[in-house]
Amino acid sequence: MTLKTIQEWLCDNGFEQGFKDRVLIAPVVIAAVLLLAGLHYSRLAGRRRQAAATAIAKIQANSKAVDQYRDLMFSWNALRKESFLPEGNDPVEWIQVQVSSYARSVSMEIVSFNPGGAQSQGNLKWQQGVFEIRGSYNNLGRFMASIENSRPFIGVTNMSLGRAASQQGAGGDFFGAVTARLDMFVFMEGASVANANSGGS
């Protein structure tokens, strides 16, 4: 809309009748132009604000996704440390030493240890081991609590109990004690898997 068009519209609608001089129309025309320009820039600014708000929302969403990914990776790394035998360990030796240590700490005796083979299903691999232990029933419970809290995780797939013969052993008088046969395993990754597959060599 041009200045001339605005002047004509004002004249056509009788705005010139209240003026003593046609020259007085100029300020009104300028005010109308400024008003129209203000409305135009107001709409433009509104669109720009909306675009900026949308961009900020996208950045915030991306930032949130990055934070979620970081938290997920942190949780996964923590889970790996708790669940898998670290690389560079011989899994047969590790599970034997670890279980024997738990047994000694609660006055249980390791009667025998039979290392099983390394097993796998998909990308998940684990080392098995069969232990026979002997001691009091109460100490057996403490031993199982230690196994449950072991990190890396030591799993028990089978457990059978029997009455131990009365004899003197590492835990003192075993009269009325129990024996337990435990099928155990530990998850492996990386070099630990290679050690197991090579027989620990």
Image: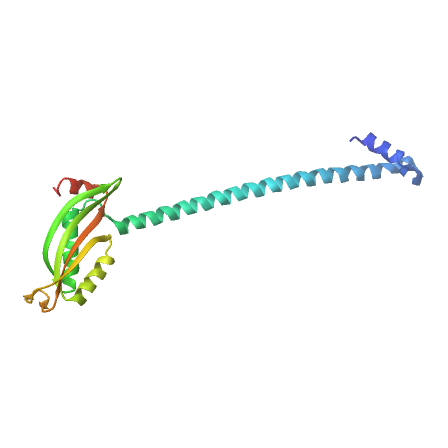
Q: Is residue 138 left or right of residue 56?
A: left
Q: Is residue 17 above or below residue 96?
A: above
Q: Which residue shows up at 69% across the image and 41% down it? A: 42
Say whether residue 149 is visible: no
Q: Which residue shows up at 20% across the image and 50% down it? A: 185
Q: Is residue 24 left or right of residue 45?
A: right
Say whether residue 177 is visible: yes
Q: Quadrant of residue 161?
A: bottom left
Q: Where is residue 140? Give x, y as percent.
A: 17, 63
Q: Is residue 3 left or right of residue 109?
A: right
Q: Is residue 201 above or below residue 153?
A: above
* Of 177 and 67, the residue lying toward us: 177
Q: How many numbered dots are placed on residues in this image?
A: 0
Q: Quadrant of the C terminus?
A: top left
Q: Quadrant of the N terminus?
A: top right
Q: Where is residue 160? Give x, y as percent.
A: 17, 57
Q: Is residue 103 above or below residue 124?
A: below
Q: Quadrant of residue 55?
A: top right
Q: Is residue 148 left or right of residue 113?
A: right
Q: Which residue shows up at 84% across the image and 39% down it? A: 28
Q: Where is residue 90? Give x, y as percent.
A: 16, 46
Identify the coloring. Answer: rainbow
Q: Where is residue 197? Give x, y as percent.
A: 16, 40
* Of 67 and 137, the residue lying toward us: 137
